Amino acid sequence: MAAIRTFVKNCQIINRNCAVLSPHVQKHGMSQYPSYYIEPVHKKEIQEDLIKSGEIQKLAHLPTKAARNDQSSSFRQDDLVNLFINYVMRNGEKVLARGLVEKAFENIKRIQLEKYHKCDDVEKKAKIELAPRVIFHQAVENCKPILALTPIKRGGVRYQVPVPITPKRSQFLSMKWLIEAAKEKDATMRFHYQLALELIDAANNKGRVVKRKQDLHKQCEANRAYAHYRWS
Amino acid sequence: MLRHLNALVEPSVKYFQANNQWVSVLFTARVEAKTFSTSPQKPEPQLKKNVSKAMKAYLERAKEHDEFMKQQNVEFQIGKRHLANMMGENPDTFSQEDIDNAIQYLFPSGLFEKKARPFMRPPEEVFPQRKAAEFDETGRPYHFLFYTGKPNYYKLMHDIVDHINEAYKFEDTMIRKGIKPDPNLALDMSGFQWIDKESLEAELVETIGDKDYETFSTTMDRLYKLPYSYRSKDFLFKYRKPLMSHEKTYQAPKPQYDADGRAFITTYECLRKRARGHVTIRSPGTGKVTVNNQDLTYFAEVQSREQVSETVLIINNRDVYPFMEELIARPFSKKYDILKKYNMC
């Protein structure tokens, strides 16, 4: 009897605090850190900006999360590249993933250099981008979709409805498609070489990945009529 | 003398007799003439006070608690002096910190729960505070807000509002004079927050609800945000608590000096996952890194090398002397884990 009473009491406590708990849980999902922990800032320039604007006063008294192994304050550090390496990684083989992406960048450099030296036209030469990182950023940017199709069931039928997507999801899809396209290769071809080719193509707004994005956009346009199914 | 009085009184008596009023009163007045004398009056007999048992018990309890606290205080002071004597220190300048150190020395305890370890503190911190008698024997409360049930809390809220109104009045006079508030004098509360609910309850010696605490918080915020809140600085500072600061929580180790006179710090047993190692940082240094008597190429992976040279970067970014770092590391497992070092001077 007493046990039942305590159980009911605990349920009441949980119910009372549920409203408090759920946004708390949603805010930092599966993170080990409480929500008020801040990300460490590695780059000196960003730190100086914070000091200038006075934001540092608010952050100085908040606890910071531990720095990750793939973060450093060197100038070569790039958050997007790190994210891309993580997406390439399988089974926690960070060394392999990082090696592949670095080799892909090396390949990009070689290909671009070849183009550059073979080109005679001065104007065209100036337009050739040699920095692999710039090409990578451009490629990711060019492959980002704006809308996506989601299946929505109305009247027993599943319609593919065009819906807007968040910038983060858009970026994720772009990088995922690039990696998928690099995997669709001949057995003799190396992944890092195919990835390099894909990145260069995407940066020039052609190639398989950009086509995939454009096909998706065409489908969204075609299914425009179902757009109102979002709100039924 | 009485004849004269009667002569004065008689016409009015006749009038009243005619009107049938005040007769008996006057008669008694005539009979019982008061005697006026110069000697001090005899004290009137004390009326017996009917104090209920509950009231008596309440007052007794309050008195007992006061006496108990006084006694404890006396004991604490004497005990402090004895302790100072034992430790060979001056009893007059024996601070709480000294007491804590002395107790730690005399009663070393390895208990995990720090609150279970022996301590010696002033009785106000040890015993839960109780309010003194809130009303006198007649039942009349001393505090004007007694009947709110939380007089100290509501008094505090009234105080805050008083400060707010004062700040408004001052602002009005300043506006009339045409003077703007000085931004340099404005209070900076970026490293502080209001005291938490438990501390507030302990200070007020009252239990307050969550909503009350929120009201307190928002009202204090309102006061603090006013341009002339610096005039109520003392009041605001009483109720604020500093947030943690990295510099204060982190205690940097002190450097040792080797034969050449160069400062160095060695951190032993740095660990991450299965990796173990000792790290030595020397200053002034050359920026060279040695790992297990080898170059940075000891690490086959670029990421590990980056992490190690990160330390050089951090120190260089802070414009500190370049240093030489020695990492005496033991072999890692297949996962190529690297050590994270945060022990820089």
Image: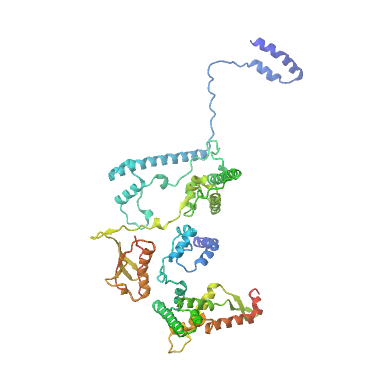
Q: Is residue A132 left or right of residue B328?
A: right
Furthest residue toward left: B259
The front one of A148 and A32 is A148
Colour mapping used in the image = rainbow
Q: Quadrant of residue B273?
A: bottom left
Q: Is residue B86 left or right of residue A91?
A: left
Q: Quadrant of residue B65?
A: top left
Q: Quadrant of the N terminus of chain B?
A: top right
Q: Quadrant of the C terminus of chain B?
A: bottom left
Q: Quadrant of residue B331?
A: bottom left
Residue B168 in the image: above or below residue B312: above
Residue B51 lies, in percent from the top left, at: 53, 35
Residue B300 in the image: above or below residue B168: below
Residue A63 lies, in percent from the top left, at: 44, 61
Identify the residue at image location x=28%, y=72%: B294
Identify the residue at image location x=46%, y=68%: A31
Residue B122 lies, in percent from the top left, at: 39, 45
